[in-house]
């Protein structure tokens, strides 16, 4: 988890927004998974590390997103948590029944969310309770 946490720590120093950083990290994880998938028949040596990196990244993302003081609305927090649960379950499935097509969902989810984070304006913050 050190790499993901280190990247978060560098955000303030680099001037990259948290959304952009999260998007970049999701792209990095997707690219690592895609590289394993593309070389499936010749070299799967990075499979475990790519899965672990993705799982650690999602652990950081879901932990941050679902913290009580996070301004995201409850529905979005629940959706992020559900995606993370899917990611964690699929990661376990890949470890126990390794097939290249099982990586598709992880790659596509990471890329889709990254695209939204890097192109969309920030989501509206939840309104404080009165």
Image (cartoon, rainbow, N blue to C red):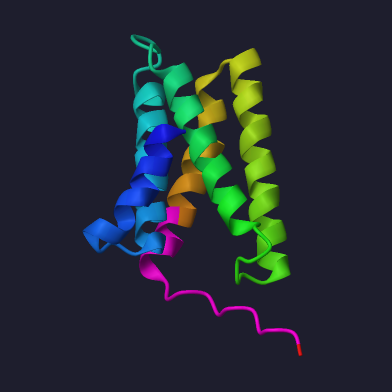
Instruction: Check the image and report above or below for 26 versus 53.
Output: below
Specify the quadrant of the image occupied by residue 97: top right
User: Of 125 and 120, which appears nearest the observer?
Assistant: 125
Q: Is residue 97 visible?
A: no
Q: Name the outermost residue toward the left.
A: 14
Q: Residue at x 38, y 46 (%)?
A: 25
Image location (x, y in percent) of residue 115: 40, 59
User: Of 84 and 105, which appears nearest the observer?
Assistant: 84
Left or right relative to 59: residue 44 = left
Residue 74 within the magenta-colored segment of the rendering: no
Left or right relative to 30: residue 63 = right
User: Of 129 and 23, which appears nearest the observer?
Assistant: 129
Q: Main secondary structure of the magenta part?
A: loop
Count of picture labels: 0
Instruction: Check the image and report above or below for 96 versus 73.
Output: above
Specify the quadrant of the image occupied by residue 125: bottom right
Left or right relative to 27: residue 65 = right
Q: Residue at x 35, y 11 (%)?
A: 43
Q: Residue at x 38, y 11 (%)?
A: 45
Q: Name the outermost residue toward the bottom.
A: 130
User: Of 72 and 39, which appears nearest the observer?
Assistant: 72
Instruction: Check the image and report above or below for 104 versus 63.
Output: above
Image location (x, y in percent) of residue 38: 36, 24
The magenta segment: 114-129
Q: Residue at x 55, y 38 (%)?
A: 105
On the rendered image, what quadrant is the C terminus found in? bottom right
Residue 115 within the magenta-colored segment of the rendering: yes
Image location (x, y in percent) of residue 57: 49, 40
Q: Is residue 73 visible?
A: yes
Left or right relative to 35: residue 104 = right
């Amino acid at each position: 988890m050190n790499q993901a946490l280190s990247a978060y720590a560098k955000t303030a120093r680099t001037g990259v927004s948290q959304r952009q950083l999260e998007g970049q990290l999701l792209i990095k994880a997707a690219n690592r998974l895609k590289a394993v998938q593309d070389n499936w028949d010749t070299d799967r040596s990075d499979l475990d590390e790519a899965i672990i990196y993705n799982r650690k990244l999602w652990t950081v993302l879901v932990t941050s997103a679902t913290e009580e003081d996070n301004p995201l609305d409850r529905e979005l927090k629940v959706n992020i948590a559900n995606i993370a649960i899917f990611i964690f379950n699929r990661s376990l499935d890949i470890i126990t029944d390794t097939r290249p097509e099982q990586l598709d969902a992880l790659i596509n989810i990471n890329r889709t969310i990254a695209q939204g984070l890097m192109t969309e304006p920030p989501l509206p913050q939840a309104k404080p309770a009165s």
